[in-house]
Amino acid sequence: MALATRQGANAPHINLYSDTQTLPTPNMRRAMAEAPVGDEQSFADPSVNALCERVAALLGQEAAVFLPSGTMCNEIAIRVHCRPGDEVIAEASCHILNFEGGGPAALSGVQIAPLPGERGIYTAEQAEAAIRPDHRYAPRSALLEVENTANMGGGTVWPLQAVRAVTDIARAHGLATHLDGARLPNAVVASGTSADEYGACFDSVWIDLSKGLGCPVGAVLAGSSAFIDEAWRWKQRMGGAMRQAGILAAAGLHALDRHWDRLAEDHANAALLAGALAQIDGFSVEPCETNILFFDVGGTGRSAAEIASRAGEAGLRVGAMGPTRMRAVTHLDVSRSDCEEAARILAEAAA
Ligand SMILES: *Cc1c(COP(=O)(O)O)cnc(C)c1O
C-alpha cells in the first residue's frame, strides 16, 4: 500500500534493477525540508559547506565540492587532470568508458587505455605495461583510474594492497590518480578498510549520494585545495554551480549518519539472494561481495531479456545486462523477504 502510493500502482513491487532506485525516506525528506540554506555558488550554503567538509575529511582529502551527479565528478576530474590528447588508464568495464556518453573524449579530448581486469580489478603489472614511453609518437599517459567497488565486475571490492600497488606505479611515473567511488561506502563496509585509507591513495576521489546511501540527487568530489579550486571552475563552466543546494546536501548529511553502516544489510541480502539463485536449474551465479549480484541464465535456454520480462510481469524488476547475463542490486528499499520472493519469481521465470 505504502509502496503503491509512493511508486504508482503499476510499479514493480520489488525493484532490484539498481541502487539508484531508492526513494528518500520520510526522515530524509524532513531533514531536507528543515535544512539551513544559502547561495551555494558563493559558499554561503551552510548545509553544502558542512557536507563538503565532512566528506573531504572522510576521504582523507583537503577539500571537496558538491556536484549534481557522479558522472560530473568523473568528467570534471578527468578534465582537471588531463589535456587533450592524453590517455587515461582504466579497467575495460569501467563507468567512464562505457556509461558516460563518450564524455572523456567529448569534454576532455582524452582517450582511454582499457585494461582487461579480473572482475573489474587490474594489476600493477598491467598498469605499468600500459604506461606509454615519453615519446612524441605516443599519447601522454596522464591519469590512472580505479573503480571501487567495480560495478560491472560484480560489485567487487579492491583490497587496499591492490589499490596501493597500482597508485604507487602511477605516482612513480608521474601520472595523476582518480578513484570512482560511486560505491566506495559499500567497499568500506564490506572490507573494513576505512574510507580515508582508500581515499588518501588518490589525487581525487568521490562518493555518490544517490546510490546505496539513498539520496535523491548528488555526489561529492574531493581532492587537494588546488584540485578543488580548478574543479570549481569546471563546475561553473559546465553549469553545475547551484543556489540553495543545501536542500540536497541535507539529504547527504542525513545519509552519512543513517544509511552508511546499514549497507551491511544490503550485502547480507545480496548474499542470501546469491545462495537462493544458485539453487535454480540453469542459473550460474557469480561471486557476490557487496550489494551487486550478477548471474548467467544461459543454462535455462532462455535469454536474459526474456527472464527479465517474465519477472517483470510477476512484479520483480531486474537488469538484463547481456544476452544471458543479469544483474540484481540490493538497497535500502529491498528487504530480506523481498529477496526470498525475488528468488521464487526468478525460479518461475526460468522454468
Ligand atoms: C552510477 C555510477 C556512476 C555515475 O554516477 P551518477 O550519479 O549516476 O552520475 C559512476 N561510476 C560508477 C561505478 C557508477 O556505478
Image (tube, grey):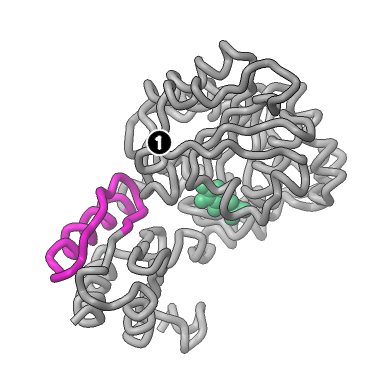
**Quadrant where the image shows the C terminus:** bottom left
- Residue 225 in percent (x, y) is at 74, 22
- Which residue sits at x=38%, y=70%? 318
Label 1, on which residue?
121
**Left or right: 8 with respect to 101?**
left
Towards the viewer: 76 or 67: 76
**Left or right: 236 with respect to 32?**
right
The amino acid at mark 1 is Ile
Q: What segment carries the magenta color?
A: 266-294
**Left or right: 211 with respect to 49?**
left
Q: Quadrant of residue 157?
A: top left
Q: Quadrant of residue 177?
A: top right
- Does the stretch in magenta take in 11? no
- Which residue sits at x=47%, y=88%? 9
Q: Residues within 10 Å of mark 1 (few under 14, many from 20)?
A: many
**Left or right: 143 with respect to 346?**
right
- Residue 217 in percent (x, y) is at 63, 56
